Amino acid sequence: MKYITIENLEFYYQDVGTGYPVVLVHGMASDHTVWEGLIPLLKENYRVLSVDLRGHGRSSKTPGPYNMELFASDIVRLLDSLKISKAHFIGHSMGGAVIQELALDYPDKVQSLTLISSFCYVNTHLKDRLLDLMKILDVEGFDAFFDACLNLTYTPEFKAENQELFKEVMDIMAKSTSTPALKEAIKACLKINFKDSIIKINIPTLIIAGLEDVFTPSHHAEEINNRISNSKIVIMDPVGHNLPVENPEDTYLVIRNFFLQFE
C-alpha cells in the first residue's frame, strides 16, 4: 500500500511491474480493485499504477466540490512526485472523462489514452441514470445504490453467476464508502462536457465499449471516436459496462495490441 500526501488529501495508489508506465483510473463509486483482472496481465510488460481518486477507496474523503480538473491534477502531482514524465492512461467510465481532462490540460504527460465504457458529455439518458442513482443513495442507502449499479454495469448473466462475490464486495465497500463524497462524484459526472474541447486532442486514443452496456451505450464511444481524429474504436461482445471485470483477458489483448505501436 502506498500513499502520497497532496495538501489535505491522502492519495492511495498501487505501483507494480516494470517497464513503460501505465496509469489506471477507475470510475464513479469504484476504486483500484476494478482492475484486479487486468493488472496481472499488464504488469508482465509495463509498470502499472492504479489510483483511488479522492473521495473513493482508500484515498481521503475530502469535502467537495469535485470535478474532472481536480481529479486530473491529483494524478499529475502523483506522477511528478514519482518522477514519471509521461505515461499511457487507461480510464473506465468517469475515469475516462478524468483522462480526457488530463489530455486537454497536460498533453505532454500523455503517451496515449484508452477510454473504456466512457463518455464525453452527459446526454439525457445518462443524466437520468445518474440522478436515479443519487436518489436511491439518498432515500434507500448504499446497499440499494450498489445493487442499482450492478444492474447498470454488468450483464444479467454475469451478475447471476457472481452473486456471492458481489455480496462480499458490497460489504467491503459499504464500510469504506463516504456517502457525501459519493454524491460529490455523481455531481462531478453530471457536469462533464467535452463535446467541443476533445476535438483538440491529437493523442493516439483507443476507445473500447461493451455491446451490452446499458449505462453508457456504445453510441457514447462512437461520439468520442468522431471527435478525436487520432482514435480507433473496438466494440466488445457479450459484455456490459464493466468489461475489465467481465472479460479482462480480451480487454488486455485489445489494449496490448494498441500499445505495440509505441514499442
Image (tube, rainbow, N blue to C red):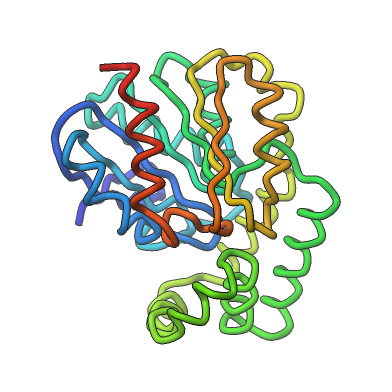
Depth order, front residue of 187/201: 201
Query: In which quadrant will I find the C terminus?
Result: top left
Residue at position x 56%, y 13% in the image: 202
| Residue 255, visible in the rendered structure | yes
Residue at position x 33%, y 51% in the image: 249
List x then y, in percent, for residue 252: 35, 43
Residue 87 position (above or below residue 250): above
In the displayed structure image, the side of residue 159 where residue 79 appears, left or right: left
Residue 207 position (above or below residue 210): above
| Residue 60, visible in the rendered structure | no
Choose top left, top right, bottom left or bottom right for residue 176. bottom left
Residue at position x 31%, y 57% in the image: 37
In the displayed structure image, the side of residue 103 where residue 79 appears, left or right: left
Depth order, front residue of 244/106: 244
In the displayed structure image, the side of residue 11 where residue 45 appears, left or right: left
Query: In which quadrant will I find the N terminus?
Result: bottom left
Q: Residue furthest front?
A: 237
List x then y, in percent, for residue 18: 14, 34
Choose top left, top right, bottom left or bottom right for residue 147. bottom right
